[in-house]
Image (cartoon, rainbow, N blue to C red):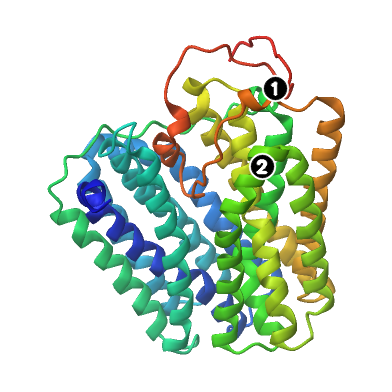
Amino acid sequence: MAGLLRPVTALLIAAAILLMGNGLLNVLIPVRADVEHFSRLAIGLLGSAYYAGLVLGCFFAPKVIARVGHIRAFVAFTAIATITPLLHAILTEPFFWSALRALNGFCFAGLFMGIESWLCGASTMETRGRVLASYTVVNLTVVTLGMQMMGLGTPGSFELFSLVAILYSLAAVPVALTRTSAPTPPATAKLRLGWLINVSPAAVAGCFFTGVANGAFWSLAPLYGRSAGLSLTEVAMFMTLAVLGGAASQWPVGYLSDRVGRRPLLVTVGIVGAAAGIALYVLSTSSPWAIFPFAVLYGCCAFPIYTLCVAHANDLVHKKRAVEVSSGLLLTFSIGAVIGPLVAGYLMSIAGHGALFLHSALAHLLIAVVMVVRVKLRPKLPAERKENFIVVPKTTPAVFELDPRAEGVSVAEPAGDCESDPAPANP
């Protein structure tokens, strides 16, 4: 394994440092915004702006990488990203912060498209699965380490913003010094929504609604914690427990989905996720020890849904379309994540901080309803038609080049969400 990862060690280290800084900033931003008396809607706008920047970056960042190369583009995006936390500390104004969050999202789209396409170029079809698994482990672990750094300072000071800037800057060092050859630039993202809906309306709806729920969670859950009376350390623990719950459930959920079917399992996790959201709404004024277990349960259900939807859609297309389908679903998720924080922020402003998880419960319930309808309309996919369940990070479309399901073969491409013997379709 060490020999396998040696060519990509510098890239994994850079990704780890970036995600650590971003994990800290994602908790710090809503907490500091609350200290500065931003409205709930304004704090929701900050989250929406980040995801809007991420979507735009998926379309435009590949052109920058193609023009100047991976290393120069990475250093440039890192330099710009480093500026954003420092400017947050200098001027605390909602619309200025929203612009900074959009810029940060744009830069991170470029950074991770560069890293992920580089990881793809440095691996072979035989090793991509293990490289993707290692990258996913990095994603799921270092984000929680960054969250725990909230205890190193106070949100009203400059210290934590400067720590984020330091981490961003350090991430450029391993990439700038690497001797690994740069690959071809990543492709510009595509979003053919009509075609995607034709391929799998269940996957499109699932990714959109989980984007609505997860975007709101990442943007506003720290504010929920503070409003519920949690200390900074407890807010970080609340977020960490949810992420760890999601990490722990990925493989069991994948194992079950390979055996009982993607959509029936999506019904289950949607209902249980909605129940966890309702519990967090009801217990929003309780002690931390009352809400912590439900944070774990919420993470167990909320975070695997996206990967289940991607797996379901990939069951329905032949492998040469896997990257396009998965990339389109990621952009669908991101569009939901732009909408989610705004809606949840508005609900929190009129119904209190607990409305965040009432909003998430509704999103998960809608996922379950959609899957029930699709199961009734279309039969279950035969076992021999299923692809293996593979956990993928929700970063940029370039990550799907690492997915072993993307290997090209000549197989007929199905037209819709029909899981029996679909006819070929025009892409």
Q: Is residue 402 left or right of residue 119?
A: right
Q: Is residue 327 left or right of residue 372?
A: left
- Looking at the rendered structure, which numbered label has been put on residue 198? 1
- Looking at the rendered structure, which numbered label has been put on residue 129? none
Label 2 sits on residue: 257
Image position of 64 with respect to 283: above or below:
above
Viewer-closest of 318 and 85: 318
Image position of 239 with respect to 389: above or below:
below
Q: Nearer the viewer, mark 2 or mark 1?
A: 2
| Amino acid beneath label 2 | Ser
Image position of 384 with respect to 360: above or below:
above
Viewer-closest of 303 and 347: 303
Q: Position of residue 330 (x, y in %)?
A: 56, 41
Q: Is residue 242 left or right of residue 319?
A: right
Which residue: 65% across, 77% down? 223
Image position of 106 with respect to 347: above or below:
above
Which residue: 71% across, 37% down? 261
Q: Position of residue 42 (x, y in %)?
A: 65, 68
Q: Is residue 192 left or right of residue 357?
A: left
Q: Position of residue 322 (x, y in %)?
A: 51, 28
Name the image quarter holding the C terminus. Answer: top right
Query: Can residue 335 be seen here?
Result: no
First-in-chain label (2 vs 1): 1
For label 1, the SS is helix
| Amino acid beneath label 1 | Asn
